[in-house]
Amino acid sequence: MSPLIADRLARVRRLISNAEAEAGRPAGSVGLVAVSKTFDADDILPALLAGQRVFGENRVQEASGKWPALKSEFSDIELHLVGPLQSNKAAEAVALFDVIHTVDREKIARALKEEMTKQDRHPRLFIQVNTGEEPQKAGVSPKDADAFIAFCRDDLGLAIEGLMAIPPVDVAPGPHFALLRKIAERNGLAGLSMGMSGDFELAIPFGATLVRVGSAIFGERDTPH
Ligand SMILES: *Cc1c(COP(=O)(O)O)cnc(C)c1O
């Protein structure tokens, strides 16, 4: 077990508090999702022991392997799916996750709705927006976002908490955070899932309500994911 992880977690929390204060936002208004993908229980445990309870994973299958045991040990864990979801994994995702950040097409929205009804479990939902309109990246394009939000809410009756984005690498993320916020505001959505290890401090003045931080807490990942 690495004491480094607890130290890094404490540092990230401190940086979040500082950024909240600097942006004139209330203390505690930004939630930290500790993204533990590729790391196993030995690395997750120090974070749990340091009081972290909100974790993110990007693969349903990987999360199903490691989280049920941890969830039975620590009853108040909140698990977030931050990676792409296939509709054949919707049942498993609804059963395991408390928050899903990656709703981005009609098929997956319908599959989630069906499973939520069937299981009577209601994970909080975010719609992913591909703010950089990158062909290889998941997310609804900014021009289709309003219609897709309306489809989820009005046609399916899904409660949508907010929007999520992953800005393109190697560009300034600020304009992408601003765009996500603008789309959220005009649709009356309060949640903004944006900011990762490299840019979470910058996402906070743009209004992030959840930052998703992996390597700054757990260290560099061996596999790219
Ligand atoms: C891996 C991942 C993160 C965390 O990335 P870091 O740069 O390690 O902080 C955040 N969001 C998503 C969607 C991810 O896949």
Image (cartoon, helix red, strand yellow):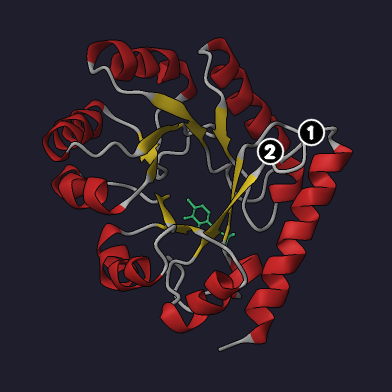
In the rendered image, the quadrant that contains the C terminus is bottom left
Q: Position of residue 81 (x, y in %)?
A: 38, 50
* Residue under numbered circle 1: 25
Left or right of 76, for residue 33: right
Question: Alpha-carbon distance for marks 1 and 2?
Answer: 7 Å
At 85% from the left and 41% from the top, the residue drawn is 21
Residue positioned most to the right: 22
Residue 171 tag number: none
Q: Amino acid at mark 2?
A: Ser
Camera-nearest residue between 1 and 50: 50
Residue 172 visible at all: no
Q: Position of residue 45 (x, y in %)?
A: 50, 77
Left or right of 76, for residue 25: right
* Dots 1, 2 in contact, CB < 8 A: yes
* Residue under numbered circle 2: 29
Question: For mark 2, does the 10 Å Cα neighbourhood hold few (<14), some (14 to 19), or many (20 or more) residues?
Answer: some
Q: In this picture, is 23 found above or below 34?
A: above
At 57% from the left and 78% from the top, the residue drawn is 46
